[in-house]
C-alpha cells in the first residue's frame, strides 16, 4: 500500500485508492488485512473510488494500545477525510459490525453495506459459544499463545480439527500468528456477539445487508435481521455464494448501491 494517513491518536494507517467515482471504503474482517478485499476493490474500480486499508495492528498499519472501538471509528474518519470528506462504508463479517457502529456514530457516511455480520442470536447456543470464545481468547493472548488464539478462531468459524492441523503446517501460519492479537479487536467490536438492536435502530442512513445463498442458515437470518432492524435497511441474497463471497458476484451489487 503506497498511501498513509494518520488517525486522531497518531496511529499511521496504510491504504490504497483505486478507480474513480463515489468513494467506498472496504473494511476487512477478522484475521485479514486490506489485501483480503483488494480483489473486490478491483471489481469496483470502473464505477467507484474503492479504498482498501490495513486496519490498525495489521499489515502495514501501526497500532497504539490500548484498543478501543472508538479508535477504529476514528481511523475510518481519517480515511474519509483523506478521500474527500465523505464515503460509503462496506464491511465483511466482523468488519461489517465495525461499519454499522461507525454508521451509527455520525460519521459523514451517506450509506453503508455489510456482508454476513456473524451475530450469533440465530445460532443454537450462540450466546454461550461466544462467551466461551471470548474467555479462552483473552487467556491465550494474555499468555502470548498466538497459535492457540488462531486455532480458537478457526474452530469458531467451523473449521475441522484435521484442517486446523494442516493449517499449522502450512506456510501461511506465520502470517496468521502475526495478526492474532487483532482477534481481540474484532471480538471487542462484536461485543457480546448478539445483534445490537438499539444501535442498529439509531442508524440514520440506508444500509444494505447482503448474504450468500449457500451460507449457513443462521448467517442468512442474521443478515436479514440487520436489514429489518435498521430503519432504512435493505436485504439481498446472492445465490450460490458462501461466507467467502466472490468479488465478481458481489461487486456489481455493491457498485449499484454505492452509485445509486
Image (tube, rainbow, N blue to C red):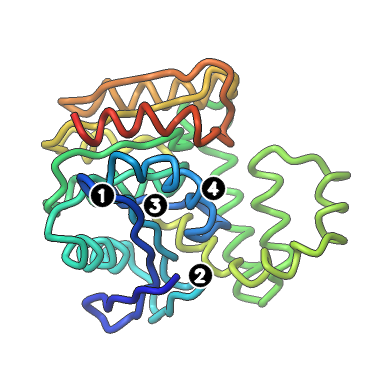
* SS label for mark 2: loop
Instruction: First in sequence, mark 3 or 2: give its number.
Output: 3
Residue 109 located left or right of residue 53: left
Q: Residues within 10 Å of mark 4 (few under 14, many from 20)?
A: some
Residue 248 numbered mark, or none: none
* SS label for mark 3: strand
Residue 206 located left or right of residue 46: left
* SS label for mark 1: loop
Circle nearer the viewer, 1 or 3: 1
Do the numbered discs 4 and 2 sit on residues whose CB atoms are within 8 Å? no
* SS label for mark 4: helix
Q: Give x and y (percent) for residue 171.
A: 80, 64
Q: Give x and y (percent) for residue 58.
A: 50, 70
Q: Is residue 192 visible?
A: no
Residue at 56% x, 33% y: name it. Answer: 243
Residue 131 numbered mark, or none: 4
Q: Give x and y (percent) for residue 248.
A: 50, 32
Q: Residues within 10 Å of mark 1 (few under 14, many from 20)?
A: few
CA separation, marks 2 and 1?
26 Å
Q: Which residue has dot 2 on it? A: 58
Amino acid at each position: 500500500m503506497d498511501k498513509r494517513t494518520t488517525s486522531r491518536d497518531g496511529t499511521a494507517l496504510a491504504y490504497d485508492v483505486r478507480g474513480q467515482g463515489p468513494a467506498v471504503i472496504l473494511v476487512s474482517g477478522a484475521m485479514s488485512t486490506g489485501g483480503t478485499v483488494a480483489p473486490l476493490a478491483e471489481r469496483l474500480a470502473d464505477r467507484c473510488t474503492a479504498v482498501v486499508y490495513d486496519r490498525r495492528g495489521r499489515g502495514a498499519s501501526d497500532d497504539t494500545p490500548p484498543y478501543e472501538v472508538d479508535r477504529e471509528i476514528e481511523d475510518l474518519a481519517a480515511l474519509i477525510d483523506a478521500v474527500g470528506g465523505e464515503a460509503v462504508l462496506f464491511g465483511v463479517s466482523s468488519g461489517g459490525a465495525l461499519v454499522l457502529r461507525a454508521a451509527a456514530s455520525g460519521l459523514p457516511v451517506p450509506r453503508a453495506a455489510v456482508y454476513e455480520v456473524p451475530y450469533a442470536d440465530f445460532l443454537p447456543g450462540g450466546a454461550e459459544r461466544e462467551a466461551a470464545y471470548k474467555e479462552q481468547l483473552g487467556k491465550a493472548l494474555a499468555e502470548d499463545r498466538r497459535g492457540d488464539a488462531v486455532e480458537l478462531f478457526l474452530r469458531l468459524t467451523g473449521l475441522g480439527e484435521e484442517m486446523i492441523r494442516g493449517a499449522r503446517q502450512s506456510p501461511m501460519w506465520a502470517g496468521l500468528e502475526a495478526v492474532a492479537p487483532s482477534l481481540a479487536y474484532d471480538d471487542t467490536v462484536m461485543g457480546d456477539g448478539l445483534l445490537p438492536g438499539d444501535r442498529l435502530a439509531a442508524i440514520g442512513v440506508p444500509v444494505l445487508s447482503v448474504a450468500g445463498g449457500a451460507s449457513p442458515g443462521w448467517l442468512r437470518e442474521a443478515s436479514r435481521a440487520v436489514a429489518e432492524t435498521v430503519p432504512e435497511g435493505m436485504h439481498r441474497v446472492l445465490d450460490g455464494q458462501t461466507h467467502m463471497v466472490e468479488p465478481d458476484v458481489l461487486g456489481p451489487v455493491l457498485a449499484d448501491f454505492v452509485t445509486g
